[in-house]
Amino acid sequence: MVKTLSKTKIYTPRFYDGLLAFFFKLAASGYIPASWFLKNLPEEQARSKKIGNLNIEVVSHCWGYSHMMAYQLSSLVNYPPKKAHVTMTVFYSPEDEKTQKQLDFFSSINVENVTWNWQPLPKELLFRRAIGRNRAALETKADWVWFSDCDIMFNENCIDSLVDSLQGRNDILVFPKKEKTTPMLKEDHPLLQKDAEPQVIRIENEENFEYYSRSKATGEFQITHGDVARAAGYCANISIYQTPSNHWCKCVEDRCFRWLLGTHGVAIDIDNIFQIRHVTKGRYKKGSLWSRVRSKIRHLKLKS
């Protein structure tokens, strides 16, 4: 279940990292052919069309979000799939002791049709989300890979309805038509149980959640065909997104991923996807300038 944790040297930022990030931002806007960086995308006729029970791999990252991860893992315990086998892959760093504690707790819970797959990384690799996603994509054995975030919950019939919608399909990329989400919650909201001991929890009252419609496969809602994932990886040839970092990097690589695949994805019906949105982000160092800036932005969104 757990691989040996390798050591990574402290990363020294390169003077041209900013230029690379800007270059690929422009590239993803369509100014450069994606084929320059991805040549082996499987053609439609080469992608399998599975019928019946499916193997689904969910890929999440967690740094400073153990209280959110508890909701995600609990959703699979509370609502185990009947039509799929789910591999729940979590990339994390053992330096994040609260997340390690959560994962140790859920490791002791056997869930039918669910395999826990904890993947420890040096934090410098964890801080660039595309690195873990790329590893998972290249190594997956699943029929479909759901690149998610740890604040997403797969509640009643979520995974099984996903399987129903994927029967006989071989789209490159799909995403849910809608989800149930909260407004931006303040740090003291009861749903944000930061100091709670590891436990199986569930959403008892849905009054905080409203439906939100989607128009494309954004960061935590990118569900990729397994054949595509194995061939393309996740921004595998985009160097800036495969470069370690000394701090958590803003997750903007999903736009580049869609550019490489040549699609915003196809909307499908999936039941009871829940997301808890919150103002204070655990992945940024508390009290840091960047943490204060990010929180201020979210407070503005909360008032809008």
Image: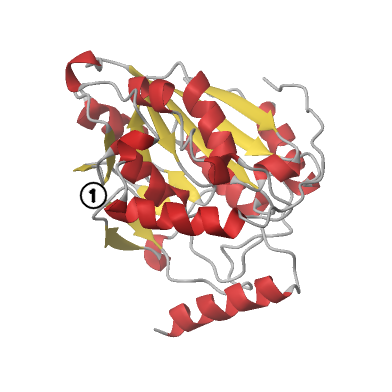
Residue 59 visible here: yes
| Residue 235 image point, x, y percent | 46, 38
Q: Is residue 182 above or below residue 120?
A: below
| Residue 140 image point, x, y percent | 48, 20
In the rendered view of the protein, which quadrant contains the C terminus? bottom left
Tell which of 184 and 263 is nearer to you: 263
Picture mark count: 1
Residue displayed at 25% across by 15% down: 48
- Element marked by disc 1: loop
Q: Is residue 155 above or below residue 80?
A: below
| Residue 189 image point, x, y percent | 58, 71
Res. 181 image quadrant: bottom left
Q: Is residue 76 above or below residue 14?
A: above
Res. 303 image quadrant: bottom left
Residue 51 visible here: no
Disc 1 packing (10 Å; few <14; some 14–19; many ≥20): some
Tell which of 128 and 97 is nearer to you: 128
Res. 156 image quadrant: top left
Residue displayed at 76% across by 74% down: 287
Tell which of 294 and 180 is nearer to you: 294
Q: Which amino acid is tagged 1?
A: Lys
In the rendered view of the protein, which quadrant contains the N terminus? top right
Residue displayed at 53% across by 44% down: 72
Tell which of 1 and 255 is nearer to you: 255
Residue displayed at 57% across by 74% down: 186
Q: Identify residue for label 1.
A: 177
